[in-house]
Image (cartoon, rainbow, N blue to C red):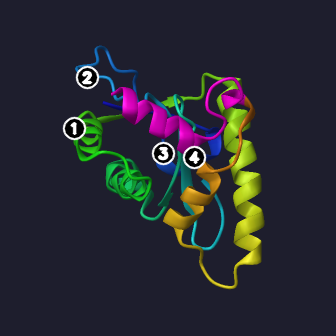
Amino acid sequence: MLIVHATRKLAQRLGRFMSAPTALSAAPALGPWYATAIFWKPQVVLFVSESTLLPVFVPLAPAATVLRRFPAELEVVLRRHGAPEAFITGELSTLGDASCLPTANRSMVGVLNEYVRLAGYAHDDLDSTPDLVWLSDWLAQTPMGPLDKRHGSADRELVALTASA
């Protein structure tokens, strides 16, 4: 099950929070995701894995289907990072239904805010609409404080996770 902890501004775009899942059949290796809306033109949603801090961008429009479109964008990002096929297949198989909850981890909200700030710099420097997969890849290479005592950046954390899976 895909569990997304959405910021208030994203939840307003999606319409509402959904109920918490009663039981998980299989937990994704990348864990729950945190997400926020970024009001660029075109608008996008930034998803960040709680376990690895891997960022994934998804176009916001149409907002009603953004959670259903997320697994396809995640697959593209995982392939770009060279994740093993078995890991990708296993991860995507656990992302059936989606549950959208309020944020529950202040540290993750800080990571979202930092990624949004950094992505804004890249977005402002580009003349055209940015390649969202490239932007995700670029952000994944950024050292992040919560990963200091582990692997330092989301791309390295993903490599370590897939090696152990």
Q: Which residues are magenta?
A: 146-165
Tag 3 and tag 2, C-beta contact below 8 Å: no
Residue 123 in picture, x, y percent from top left: 70, 70
Mark 3 lies on a secondary structure that is loop
Mark 2 lies on a secondary structure that is loop
Q: Amino acid at mark 3?
A: Gly
**Would you place residue 39 above or below residue 28 in this image?**
below
Tag 4 and tag 2, C-beta contact below 8 Å: no
Q: Is residue 63 left or right of residue 125?
A: left
Q: Amino acid at mark 1?
A: Ser
Report which residue position mark 1 lands on: 93
Residue 29 in picture, x, y percent from top left: 37, 28
Residue 24 in picture, x, y percent from top left: 28, 18
Report which residue position mark 3 lands on: 15
Dot 2 crowding, Cα within 10 Å, few <14, some 14–19, many 20+: few
- Whether residue 30 is visible: no
Q: Residue at x 65, y 31 (%)?
A: 108
Between label 4 and label 1, give the one nearer the viewer. Answer: 1
Q: Which mark is residue 10?
A: 4
Tag 1 and tag 2, C-beta contact below 8 Å: yes
Question: Sequence order check: which comes first, mark 3 or mark 1?
Answer: 3
Mark 4 lies on a secondary structure that is helix
Between label 4 and label 2, give the one nearer the viewer. Answer: 2
Q: Residue at x 38, y 33 (%)?
A: 163
Separation of residues labelled 3 and 4 (CA atoms): 9 Å
Q: Dividing the picture into quarters, in which one does residue 80 lie? A: bottom left
Separation of residues labelled 1 and 2 (CA atoms): 9 Å
Report which residue position mark 2 lands on: 26
Tag 3 and tag 1, C-beta contact below 8 Å: no
Give 115 or 44, whichever is nearer the viewer: 115
Between label 3 and label 1, give the one nearer the viewer. Answer: 1
